[in-house]
Amino acid sequence: MFLENLKTIGLQVLILYLIAGIGFATDKAGIFKQSDGKRLIDLLFNVILPIAIIHTFMTMEYSKEHIKGILIAFACSFATHLLGAGISLLTFRKRSLKERGIYHYAMILSNAAFLALPLAKSVIGNEGIFYCSVYVAVFNVIAFTLGIYEISGHQARLDLKKLIFNPGTISVLIGLPLFLLQPKIPYFIDYPMEIVGNCNSPLAMIVFGTFLANSSFKNMFAKKEIYFVSLVRLVVIPLCMLGIFYVVGVRGPLLTAMLISASAPTATNTAMYAAKYDNDTALGSEIAAQSSVLSVITMPIIVALAMVVG
């Protein structure tokens, strides 16, 4: 059973990274560069991803199981981030606040929106997006609070507007009432939303590929600190959460969705936030790139384990 699941998940991860290879190749060929990808990220994050999340919520079957699942997903998502924060506090204490902040940010925050969501859809279907969307909303809360506090070297002030008024949180706030009320959505609204939402996975991976194309593979595999961060991000946190989720009784698609999100590599916006807060952009890129490359091996194993125990 484990080997069958491993093969299935491994194939889905490989497919996603082959799509990322398109972005890698087009960047190297000068057709679609990282600078173009950064502009496309705004469209993905502010328009396409929210549409995908809202459409999933409004088409998901209303049931007590799904209502309970949403509440558990919120608890699981916060628990995962809190565990990551707790582990990170024990590390890199002798480094400067800014260097330590990048390492901490990279450990705590995963690439939930641009990698976990596409993988969850491939493995579980719409139910995967349904639960992973909750993780993305929690991700935004943590990113705009603890995340920017860490990566700015404890200099950034909390922006309450961004905490609430960000695309990930707003899309869930819009989607939840639609899920609870189950209104009949006209076809001419439903179908365009479905088409646009389906663009999220391939476009996100193509953009992701342009970032990989501009990473220094020599540097990312030369620093022992980056290996340690990848170990925590890809192995320690997801395995700890798998044990915790199993003990408290989380099972089925919900367990798989939470582990997909928890085992995703470092968030690609690590480098972007590093640049915004005058931190080491190159280091942020190297951590995100290395953990992304290694996740090709680790994610299928972690997710296959979740499917076996769940």
Image (cartoon, helix red, strand yellow):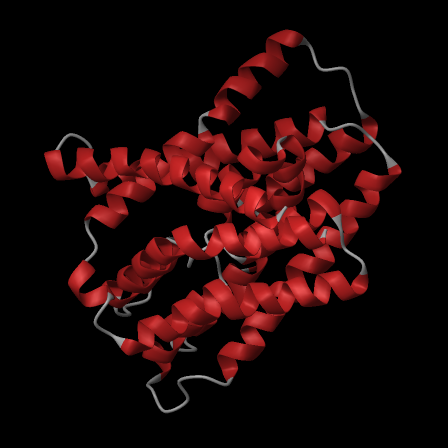
Q: Which of these two is toward me, 133 or 16?
A: 16
User: In the displayed structure, would residue 163 be above or below residue 129?
Assistant: below
Q: Is residue 227 visible?
A: yes
Foreground pick, 32 / 305? 305
Q: Position of residue 153 (x, y in %)?
A: 38, 77
Residue at 61%, 55% in the rendered image: 305
Position of residue 302 in the picture relative to residue 16 (left or right): right
Please state which of residues 256 and 277 is positioned toward the viewer in this rendering. Answer: 256
| Residue displayed at 18% across by 38% down | 27
Q: Quadrant of residue 189?
A: top right
Image location (x, y in percent) of residue 29: 11, 34
Residue 157 visible in the current orientation: no
* Residue at horizontal 49 percent and vertical 77 percent from the top: 88
Q: Position of residue 300 (x, y in %)?
A: 50, 50
Asked which quadrant contains residue 75, the reply is bottom right
Residue 207: where, in percent of width, then height?
Answer: 32, 39
Describe residue 79's horizontal placement relative to residue 93 as left or right. right
